Amino acid sequence: MQTFTLHQGLVAPMDRENVDTDAIIPKQFLKSIRKTGFGPNLFDEWRYLDKGEPGQDPASRQPNPDFVLNQPRYAGASVLLARKNFGCGSSREHAPWAIDQYGFRAIIAPSYADIFFNNCFKNGLLPIVLPEAVVDQLFNEVLAFPGYQLTIDLARQVIVKPQGEEIPFDVQAFRKYCLLNGLDDIGLTLRHKDKIAAYEAERLATKPWLAHTMVS
């Protein structure tokens, strides 16, 4: 998993409440058994005028010029500004995969659906919770100033605005540790690989029959 320490990026405003996971990555794209390739279909039904299908070349699609991510001023955005209850709906891990693979590193919103919120941390995304009034102010500034960027300092737990003002945010200590060190569940387990190997060796020494497999 990619580490998250200090990130500066262009902000894209998703000015909708209750954005659900089916809007983030529509159901037809969940057929893939791979964990990659979902970025081109992020917000697919809003981003394109035609219906998308798995494996379709994005260059052959009809972009919706009114959708925020298709507007030139937000090209290359890596911080997503959202409204309350972002990520609601079904508990599909494909949603944070798609957001991450599009190029976003952090999301800022007043609230999130619990499962989506947890899945973000497990996949290297930083979902930041801020008071609704603060989020409103950020929306106003993003819309008023093209090229608006924020710097997110996870170690210090602050968002730094272009003029230098800092906005503090909370993050649970263990989740912070995992992001700073790029550790997902597998990475956390592999920290103990020597102990696991020693246990397996001891188990096979005392119970050698476990090394045998049945032959059909």
Image: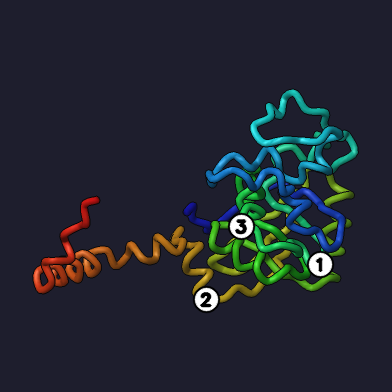
Residue 106, x across and y down, in percent: 65, 56
**Which mark's residue is nearer the viewer, 1 or 2?**
1
* Residue type at numbered disc 2: Ala
The single residue placed furthest to the top in the displayed view is: 60
**Which mark's residue is nearer the viewer, 1 or 3?**
3
Residue 143, x across and y down, in percent: 87, 49
Q: Which residue is mark 3?
A: 93
Dot 3 alpha-carbon crowd within 10 angstroms: few under 14, some 14 to 19, many 20 or more: some
* Residue 161, image quadrant: bottom right
Distance (Cα) linking label 1 and label 2: 23 Å
Tell me if residue 99 comes above or below residue 115 in the rendering: above
Q: Which residue is mark 1?
A: 84
Name which residue lies at 60% across and 57% down.
Answer: 125
* Residue type at numbered disc 1: Lys
- Is the residue under label 3 in contact with that under label 1 (CB below 8 Å)? no
Q: Which residue is mark 2?
A: 173
